Image (tube, rainbow, N blue to C red):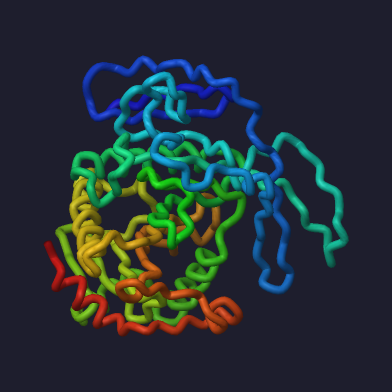
């Protein structure tokens, strides 16, 4: 794989990940672009003890354009896009409409909170494009391309973790307008966050309590229990197991755990990276076969915090879930889920796992 960094017209970084061949000579971005937005801020919720990001400039971001106006397609035929190249394999670039922005010393005034907490939403948001085919999805990728995407995740995790003030790197993909996708072109995103996310903190608390109570590794024991039970295992390879968790919140939910406990993507061996792609493509194929239609989903990598002293308690894993509960029916977050955070799953996890095993291609 060849890695080629370059700059876009407004100074944002772009990195090409090519699968061999001659070294890339980046084409110049000829667009006349205004400076990137810098209006992001963070506010502290004293009741939930969580940060909330306010990024009002994102209201004007590109929303479900036609394929002729897609900003992630190659720049061809005189139409300049976010990727100034006639062809590419995998590309990462700084988001033009970021939720988090570099902190250039901008000062924020108190707005009358209980305790002043406003801070610049300092961080970085990148877009990771999986290929130039506008009509494809991750499930359509070859194992070689899936491995290239994995190497891009690793590269960006290392680069963003090294930035000052970054506490966690989050790689994810949203697919389908039902999830809230605003661009159809196959892509994911990577957030370099200035804080450790609430879910990560809560799982670290759980792992710490479990270690003190039992002396064991919570994530290793969850994986072992699922493997021994077997009823919720969807597929298994030499280095990974995909299973529906016993307490799944979503009608279709699968977690992918590496058999070896590692904190983050860069810690995976070459064999583990290869093996992941094969299993992930298999699981995505099962997702689309479940209702004989592309399944909307969120695919979320959980990596250890960059600097948290409890980093050693964390474990890399991928959580994949869909809001589709039946053909033509979506699960909406109703009063219990949205109001109180109490999930009610209409489908038994064992049933979901059995269905996903049965639709193996």
Residue 259 visible somewhere in the drawing: no
- Residue shown at 37%/81% (left/top)? 247
Q: Position of residue 191 (x, y in %)?
A: 51, 47
Left or right of residue 281, residue 218 in this image: right
- Residue shown at 87%/61% (left/top)? 112
- Given residues 93 and 5, the one toward you in this image is 93
> Taking 218 as reference, is 111 above or below it?
above
Residue 88 visible somewhere in the drawing: yes
Q: What is the quadrant of residue 214 in the picture?
A: bottom left
> Taking 253 as reference, is 166 above or below it?
above
Quadrant the N terminus occupies: top left
Quadrant the C terminus occupies: bottom left
- Residue shown at 57%/82% (left/top)? 335
- Residue shown at 24%/62% (left/top)? 288
Q: Position of residue 296 (x, y in %)?
A: 36, 61
Left or right of residue 49, residue 336 in this image: left
- Given residues 17 and 213, the one toward you in this image is 17
Q: Position of residue 318 (x, y in %)?
A: 35, 60
Q: What is the quadrant of residue 52 in the picture?
A: bottom right
Q: Position of residue 135 (x, y in %)?
A: 30, 44
């Amino acid at each position: 794989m060849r890695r080629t960094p370059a700059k876009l017209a407004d100074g944002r970084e772009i990195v090409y990940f090519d699968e061999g061949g001659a070294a890339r000579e980046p084409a110049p971005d000829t667009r006349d672009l205004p400076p990137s937005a810098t209006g992001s801020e963070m506010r502290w919720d004293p009741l939930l003890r969580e940060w909330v990001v306010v990024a009002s400039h994102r209201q004007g971001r590109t929303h479900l354009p036609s394929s002729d106006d897609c900003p992630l397609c190659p720049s061809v035929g005189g139409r300049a896009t976010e990727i100034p190249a006639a062809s590419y394999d995998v590309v990462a670039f700084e988001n033009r409409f970021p939720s988090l922005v570099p902190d250039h010393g901008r000062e924020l005034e108190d707005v009358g909170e209980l305790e002043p907490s406003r801070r610049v939403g300092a961080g970085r948001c990148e877009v990771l494009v999986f290929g130039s085919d506008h009509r494809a999805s991750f499930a359509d990728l070859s194992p070689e391309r899936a491995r290239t995407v994995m190497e891009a995740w690793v590269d960006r995790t290392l680069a963003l973790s090294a930035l000052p003030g970054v506490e966690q790197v989050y790689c994810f993909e949203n697919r389908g307008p039902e999830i809230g996708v605003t661009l159809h072109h196959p892509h994911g995103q990577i957030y370099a966050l200035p804080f450790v996310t609430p879910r990560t903190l809560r799982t670290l608390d759980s792992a710490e309590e479990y270690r003190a109570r039992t002396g064991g590794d919570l994530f290793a024991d969850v994986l072992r229990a699922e493997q021994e039970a077997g009823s919720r295992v969807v597929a298994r390879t030499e280095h990974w197991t995909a299973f529906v968790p016993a307490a799944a919140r979503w009608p279709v939910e699968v977690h992918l755990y590496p058999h070896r406990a590692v904190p983050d993507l860069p810690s995976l061996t070459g064999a583990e990276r290869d093996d992941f792609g094969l299993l992930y493509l298999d699981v995505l194929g099962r997702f689309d076969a479940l209702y004989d239609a592309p399944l909307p989903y969120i695919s979320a990598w959980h990596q250890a915090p960059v600097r948290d002293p409890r980093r050693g308690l964390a474990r890399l894993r991928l959580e994949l879930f869909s809001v589709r509960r039946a053909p033509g029916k979506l699960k909406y977050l109703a009063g219990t889920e949205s109001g109180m955070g109490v999930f009610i799953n209409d489908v038994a996890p064992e049933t979901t796992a059995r269905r996903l095993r049965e639709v193996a291609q």
